[in-house]
Amino acid sequence: MDTKISNQEAFANKVVWITGASAGIGEEMAVAFAHSGSKLVLSARNSEQLERVEKRCYEAGADRESVLVMPLDVVDLDAMPGAVDKVMEAYSRIDVLINNAGVGVRDFCTEVKLDLYRTALEVNLIGPIALTKQVLPIMIKQGSGHIAGTSSVAGKVGIPLRTAYCAAKFGLIGFLDALRAEVAYHGIKVSTIIPGLVKTGAVANAMTGDGSVIGAEEGVMTEGLTAEEAAAAILPQLARQADEFVIGNCDSSKMVELKRNDPTQIFRGLEQMAESLYS
């Protein structure tokens, strides 16, 4: 695809389904797609927040027939077929699926309950795989489609206190890489989004090892892109159908390049980071 194609040229009248659309990067992507003329499906667990995002999409230019609020918990696998049916009833096709829902876990491995590893894997990995498997036959029948997944720098670099999150986000990248190879034959594109630091509620909403939420007081993010800036960087990359791309210029995103070029240095540096967290 032409690398200079505009968001409007790429996404006008395209049916774009976004999970994790109730806040953060997902919300801002929804607004940006609305501004580009897309037909939207907004999914997350919080219906009230989705309705707020829906109003923002209307303000960005979407008409009343172009936004479908579809509450969905990505760990509720039994609800997925019905959700897909409703999307097809409304739009008759699905052009872009963005698996963006996620949850964080931050604590030392010794402190993280095993059930939280399961939760991290179910939300960040199994959910996206399950929804992709529901949507993929539709895209194959169409002979076109674009599947994207929001991973993380923590899906490329093993960062201390993130053993559960890293396991899931590394896995998501592996799934998308293998899927990309499989579905190219069918005219379907796969993109992996790798954000660095983005100022969202992700840290505040993340869990500690016992399952308690970190909370807004301790989970304040002062560095990185705003969610709006992240969405503004993501859409052009999706428009040109980039295979994989890192968003942001902060130290965390630079770690991806450093691990590629000098893995030993990044491993020793992360060991020092972990040591400092014990004191």
Image: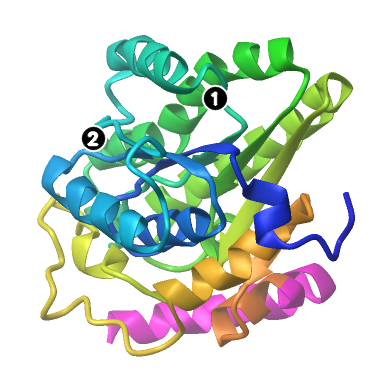
Amino acid type, callout 1: Thr
Residue 168 in view (yes/no): yes
Does the magenta run of residues contain 173?
no
Q: Nearer the viewer, mark 2 or mark 1?
A: 1
Q: Is residue 105 above or below residue 12?
A: below
Task: Return the residue at label 2.
Answer: 115
Task: Return the residue at label 1.
Answer: 132
Q: Secondary structure at mark 2?
A: helix
Write the residue at 35% across / 46% down.
20
Q: In which quadrant is the C terminus drawn?
A: bottom left
Write the residue at 10% across / 55% down.
212
Q: How is the image coloured?
A: rainbow
Q: Main secondary structure of the magenta part?
A: helix
Q: Secondary structure at mark 1?
A: helix
Left/right placement of residue 114 relative to residue 95 reads left
Left/right placement of residue 12 relative to residue 211 reads right
Write the residue at 15% across / 40% down.
47
Image quadrant in which you'd find residue 76: top left
Q: Is residue 245 above or below residue 40?
A: below
Image quadrant in which you'd find residue 146: top right
The x and y percentages for residue 174 are 67, 39
Image quadrant in which you'd find residue 13: top right
Between 72 and 115, the one nearer to me in the picture: 72
Q: Is residue 205 above or below residue 181?
A: below
Does the magenta run of residues contain 274?
yes
Magenta span covers which residues? 257-279
Left/right placement of residue 199 relative to residue 184 reads left
Mark found first going from the N terminus, 2 or 1: 2
